[in-house]
Amino acid sequence: MSFTEDDSSDVGLAGQSKLESFLFSQELSSKVPFFTFQGDEEEDLEHFLELRTICLGEGAKEESNVVEVTAMNHQGKNISVPIANLHISCLPMVSLGEFELKAPVTIRLKAGTGPVTVSGLHLIASQVEESDLSEDDEDDYDEEEEEEITPIKPAKKKQKQ
């Protein structure tokens, strides 16, 4: 399941970016303890993973389930950080807000057997080129411009007889 979110305020100006977002969900367990999120290899696209929630699934045991992410830091080195320690009796779910990481990102169930569901958004940023604008958009722009330029003429007064 996915949905697209075009930032229409950015469309129309060359060099602006277009952002599409798709629903992301991955279940981790003792059978599938990690998942690596990677974007496409296209040059003009940037892929981000925006984590929103991490929650224990049905059948989770009375144990700590630690979820860790591995991603690149500002120096280009991989760093691993625990982001959730869930327990069915006291903390079955955590909201991360808008925790955004640039691909590639590895999500790992560091401790516990799960199941743990990690969800959020897969964001794809691309540059909008002037040639990407449709002719309809350009025509609408020209009409608006003409309307602004047209001078306003004063109304004629009727003469009393």
Image (cartoon, rainbow, N blue to C red):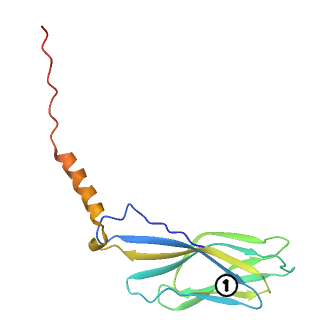
The percent position of residue 16, horizontal first and vertical second, equals 34, 70
Q: Amino acid at mark 1?
A: Glu
Which residue is more in the foreground, 115 or 160? 160
The percent position of residue 110, horizontal first and vertical second, equals 72, 88
Which of the 4 image quadrants contains residue 152?
A: top left
- Please tell me how many numbered marks the rendered image carries: 1
Q: Is residue 34 left or right of residue 10?
A: right
Which of the 4 image quadrants contains residue 67?
A: bottom right
The percent position of residue 79, horizontal first and vertical second, equals 58, 89
Q: Residue at x 84, y 78 (%)?
A: 59
Q: Residue furthest right?
A: 62
Q: Secondary structure at mark 1?
A: strand
Q: Residue at x 71, y 78 (%)?
A: 117
> Callout 1: 10 Å neighbours few (<14), some, many (20+)?
some
Q: Is residue 25 left or right of residue 4?
A: right
**Would you place residue 74 above or below residue 155 in this image?**
below
**Would you place residue 50 above or below residue 13 in this image?**
below
Q: Residue at x 83, y 74 (%)?
A: 88
Instruction: Quarter of the image for the C terminus: give it.
Output: top left
Which residue is more in the foreground, 3 or 60? 3
Residue topped by disc 1: 68
The percent position of residue 11, horizontal first and vertical second, equals 35, 65
Q: Residue at x 25, y 58 (%)?
A: 139
Instruction: Quarter of the image for the N terminus: give it.
Output: bottom right
